[in-house]
Amino acid sequence: MNIEIGQRLLEYRKKNGLSQEELAERIGVSRQAVSKWERAEASPDTDNLIMLSKIYGVTLDELINGAPLGGQYGKNSYEEENNCSLSGDENPDNQKRSDSVSFKHGIHVRAKNGDSVDIGFNGIHVDSAADDTHVHIDGDGVFVRDGKNNLKEDHIFSHAKEDEECPDIVRGLKKFPFPVVCALLYIIFGFCDIFGGWSTGWIIFMTIPLYYTLIDAVYKKNAAHFAYPVLAAMIYMIFGLVYSNWHPSWIVFLTVPLYYFVCDIFKK
């Protein structure tokens, strides 16, 4: 699906006063699916297209081929459902919208100028009608679309795209519940008084960033991706808390700039 269709789906949704989460609930898909349609990363199937056309009150041709925006744009359906209008009078021609706020499944703000903000467990989503800028921050990454740049979408950071390019073994290692393992080990250390028990066993949690950054460093063949400063801090805490040797173990921090200096040499 091209970016023009994705932008059109976004405009129809906004014209109908629906959030991505509300539209997803009506169709029976995830909020992420709606987001990907509007970012032109995926295409809705035929059944979903038919449902979208019915919700927006337009034909499939208008929805796909870019006929003038139409639809059943009476009262803002978002305000109607949540009954949370804050100001402004209802206009039967829908030329003006009133500001509204809803706390259903998060925080949802609708401004009368068309701007909207959605904050919830599924991420943060901001749509600006003034300059046609859209920002989405969720589990798939951070996405920014600027209408002034020919609707060009910039993938600042995307877990989904990165995971798709990774080999199966890398994806498997990243999905391994290493933090859960650390929590279980900490409980064992505490009850069995291993490695200093509760007082020092928490150091094991410092291995969590080491685990994931080591995978990234090996896969990308770039040692600079490894969280070496965390390793240095971990070594320092072990010498200090376990062996009471705070001095001169602090010298380990002097190896941090040396580590990245060596990484830079190998990179060049």
Image (cartoon, grey):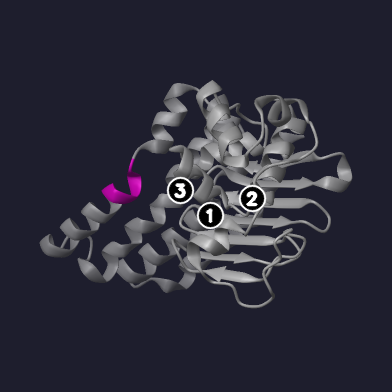
Q: Is residue 225 shown left or right of residue 95?
A: left
Residue 100, compared with residue 71, is above or below; it is below
Which residue occupies the extreme left position in the image? 192
Residue 243 appears in view:
no
Name the mark nearer the viewer: 1 or 2. 2
Q: Quadrant of residue 116?
A: bottom right
Q: Position of residue 109 (x, y in %)?
A: 61, 66
Viewport quadrant of the C terminus? top right
**Identity, as a three-letter code, of the amino acid under mark 2:** Asn
**Identity, as a three-letter code, of the amino acid under mark 1:** Gly
Q: Quadrant of residue 229?
A: bottom right
Residue tagged 2: 16
Instruction: Give SS at disc 1.
Output: strand
* Range covered by the magenta-colored residues: 177-181
The CA span between labels 1 and 2 is 21 Å
**Mark 1 in CB contact with mark 2 (< 8 angstroms):** no
Name the residue located 22 percent from the left edge and 68 percent from the top edge: 198
Residue tagged 3: 210
Residue tagged 1: 123
Crowd around label 1: few <14 · some 14–19 · many ≥20 (10 Å): some
